[in-house]
Image (cartoon, rainbow, N blue to C red):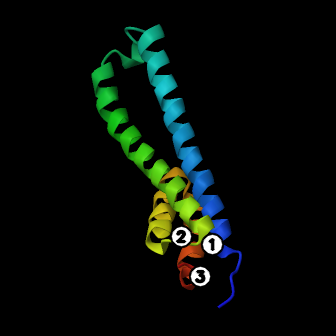
Amino acid sequence: MENTWMPKVAGILDIVAGAFALFIILIWALWFAAFSYFIPGGPAEFHDFPMSIMAIIFIPMSIFLLTAGILAIVGGTYALKRKKWKLALAGSIASFFGSSPLGVAAIIFTALSKNQFE
């Protein structure tokens, strides 16, 4: 079958969603750092919600999103090269966590273009 546009679009969507996931992590890190540095006790409504609990929530979420973002970018590059379909599909699935609409489209395009990969 001839090469179509689907793997390239899926790769671009993967890379954009992965970059967006990394951007979200940056925003979280800046927010968390600013919140813990500039407001040592936190605002009045957060006095019963200590920073350690916020760290317990945000650190695993950030690690998961970092892993998903990197996997989405790597999978997107393989989709652009039309190599290693399984890795491209894994990147598309990981891109779902960075941006759901882009991830769904990337999953569909990668799955439909399986026979175009080496």
- In terms of image quadrants, where is residue 58? top left
> What is the number of callouts on the image?
3
Which residue occupies 45% across, 19% down?
33
Amino acid beneath label 2: Ile
View extreme (bottom): residue: 1
Tell me the kind of residue under disc 3. Answer: Gln
Instruction: Look at mark 2 in the image and give the residue it sits on.
Output: 107
Residue 79, compared with residue 18, is above or below; it is below
**Which residue bears the numbered disc 1?**
7
The foreground one among 118 and 36 is 118
Badge number at residue 98: none
Q: Is residue 49 at least partly visible in the picture?
A: no
Q: CA distance from mark 2 to mark 1?
A: 10 Å
Q: Helix, strand, or loop for circle 3?
A: helix
- x, y percentage for residue 4? 70, 80
Q: Give residue 100's position: percent from left, percent from top.
A: 54, 58
